[in-house]
């Protein structure tokens, strides 16, 4: 097993690389969706190895079930449900993934704050 580095600079480098990989995934998606999924996979591996959390904005860009990079309108659907009693505001956002048929439900307020 690889020894974990105790240097805090390595965590900063890991966060930078994770950000770069998600940016590359966004740029590569129109032509090579499989490459985007690979970039997400590599970013997750870096985060797990260095024990670094992936930022909230980046966490919402991939499916936690099949680890696919998500682009609204291409491989996922976004639905806003009004009047549900799941949140105090009554609005929820449903993200429906086409690849794995998984659904993520979040309150509209928390979803809009991250965007």
Image (cartoon, rainbow, N blue to C red):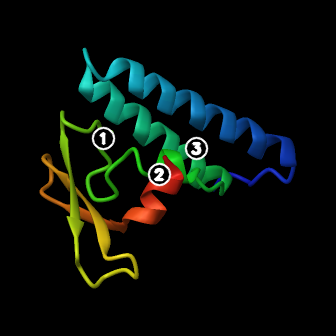
Element type at marker 1?
A: loop
Report, in whole angstroms, how far the alpha carbon at label 1 lies from the one at label 3.
19 Å
What residue do we see at 51% from left, 40% from top?
43
Quarter of the view holding residue 91:
bottom left
Quarter of the view holding residue 20:
top right
What residue do we see at 19% from left, 51% from top?
97
Check the image and report above or below for 23 versus 95.
Answer: above
Which numbered disc, 3 or 2, marks the residue that appears first in the sequence? Answer: 3
What residue do we see at 12% from left, 47% from top?
98
Check the image and report above or below for 15 versus 2.
Answer: above
Check the image and report above or below for 23 versus 76.
Answer: above
Along the viewing direction, whichever of 100 and 78 lies nearer the viewer: 78
Which numbered disc, 1 or 3, marks the residue that appears first in the sequence? Answer: 3
Element type at marker 2?
A: helix
Which residue is label 3 attached to? 46
Which numbered disc, 1 or 2, marks the residue that appears first in the sequence? Answer: 2
Which residue is label 1 attached to? 70
Which residue is label 2 attached to? 59
Judge depth for marks 3 and 2 and give the one in front.
Answer: 2
Q: Position of residue 61 (x, y in %)?
A: 40, 44
**Circle on res. 49:** none
Judge depth for marks 1 and 3 and give the one in front.
Answer: 1
- The image shows a total of numbered marks equal to 3
What residue do we see at 57% from left, 51% from top?
54
* Drawn side of residue 89 relative to residue 78, left or right: right
* Drawn side of residue 80 relative to residue 109, left or right: left
Mark 1 Cα-neighbour bin, 10 Å: few <14, some 14–19, many ≥20: many
Along the viewing direction, whichever of 12 and 78 lies nearer the viewer: 78
Element type at marker 3?
A: helix
Name the image quarter holding the N terminus.
bottom right
Report, in whole angstroms, how far the alpha carbon at label 1 lies from the one at label 2.
10 Å
Q: Position of residue 59 (x, y in %)?
A: 47, 51
């Amino acid at each position: 097993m690889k020894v974990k580095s105790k240097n805090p600079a390595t965590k900063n480098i890991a966060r930078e690389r994770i950000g770069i990989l998600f940016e590359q995934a966004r740029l590569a998606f129109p032509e090579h969706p499989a490459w985007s999924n690979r970039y997400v996979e590599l970013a997750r591996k870096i985060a797990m190895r260095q024990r670094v959390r992936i930022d909230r904005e980046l966490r919402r860009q991939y499916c936690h079930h099949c680890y696919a990079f998500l682009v609204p309108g291409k491989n996922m659907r976004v639905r806003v449900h009004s009047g549900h009693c799941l949140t105090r505001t009554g609005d929820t956002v449903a993200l429906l993934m086409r690849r794995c048929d998984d659904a993520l439900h979040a309150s509209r307020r928390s979803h809009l704050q991250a965007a």
